[in-house]
Amino acid sequence: MADMAGGVRGERLIQDHPDGLHVLRGLKGIGATTHAPGRPPLGAAQLRRVLAAFDEQGATVTYHLAFGMWRKTMQRPNGVFVTGTDTGIGKTLVSAILARAWNADYWKPVQTGVAEEPGDTDTVAHLAQLPPERLHLPAYVLQAPLSPWAAATLEDTIVDATTIVPPATRAPLIVEGAGGLYVPIDDTHMMIDLIARLDMPVVLAARSGLGTINHTLLSLKALQRRGIPVLGVVMSGPPSAGNKEAIERFGGVRVLAQIPPLPRVDAAAVDALAQGIAPLAECLAALYDAETEAD
């Protein structure tokens, strides 16, 4: 499979069982109900003795799990999906900076909260100085400042994540999500499901301050479990060298930029910050070349 990239990852899961009944339930839960070839099943008396031993001392069971995922490598995506560790984390500012740095188009598939403030498309257009032809209309626009699923329910509107299709573009495309990874879009899909379906690498927007290590590493772990590549993290707030180092070391990702508190958020500030962003082709090459070496 020369045109595929991916591999098998292993993980260890340890479960504590207080008695024999819990051990049996655990084995049934994973489908381990067939005795080993050539070995007769335990009789009722033997099984009772085994369960009694577990009842006295309990048991710790270690499962070694292996899971794999592969993707085609013949054509690298020309763009990124910007998501965040939380809502209000600065995704729109990050999107504007990346759009300016990479001369990219911008698209927000699902826009909520327009009853209280302008949509993010207008904000990015102003901050990144994008002409109308570089902007793409959302698939869904909702009034309430809630998750897409909650806003659609309130407004008696149907949102279907499977109908969301990215626009055709020649330029790189910056896609901005709504909220974090586990924000529900409809009755069955979360934002992370949309990211996986669009098959784009992620730029994760995160805070720089206290608590960001935990929130960022949890988000990175969720993306890793789905086999979604992460181009890097952008941190916003007072720069923290320690938090940056921890995220890079334990998250296995690059911090692409640290956005300090800005006295004014305008096009000039975005342009200045965009100058410090590495070219998209360079970032994609670093990401996918590293994945190929790891495989």
Image (cartoon, rainbow, N blue to C red):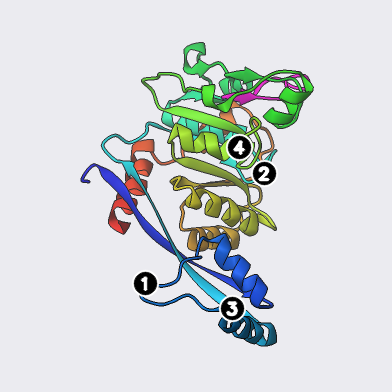
- Give percent across and percent down for residue 166: 47, 23
Which residue is under mark 1?
37
Instruction: Between label 4 and label 3, give the one nearer the viewer.
Output: 3
Segment tinted magenta in the rendering: 109-120
SS category of the residue bearing label 3: helix
Q: Is residue 53 left or right of residue 273?
A: right
Q: Residue at x 60, y 42 (%)?
A: 181
Q: Residue at x 49, y 52 (%)?
A: 225
Judged left or right of residue 279, residue 43 is: right
Q: Amino acid at mark 1?
A: Pro
Q: Nearer the viewer, residue 128 or 47?
A: 47
Look at 69% across and 77% down and name the residue there. Answer: 18
State the separation of the CA atoms marked 3 and 1: 19 Å
Q: Amino acid at mark 2?
A: Asp
Q: State the residue at coordinates (45%, 19%).
A: 167
Q: Nearer the viewer, mark 4 or mark 1?
A: 1
First reached walking from the N terminus: tag 3 or tag 1: 1
Which mark, residue 190?
4
Pointer 2 or 4: first along the chain: 2
Q: Name the residue tied to disc 2.
A: 86
| Alpha-carbon span between mark 3 and mark 2 | 53 Å
Foreground of the two, 140 or 213: 140
Neighbor class of circle 4 (other Cα within 10 Å; few <14, some 14-19, many 20+) is some
Tally the marks.
4
Look at mark 3 in the image and give the residue it sits on: 44
Crowd around label 2: few <14 · some 14–19 · many ≥20 (10 Å): many
Q: Is residue 140 above or below residue 189?
A: above
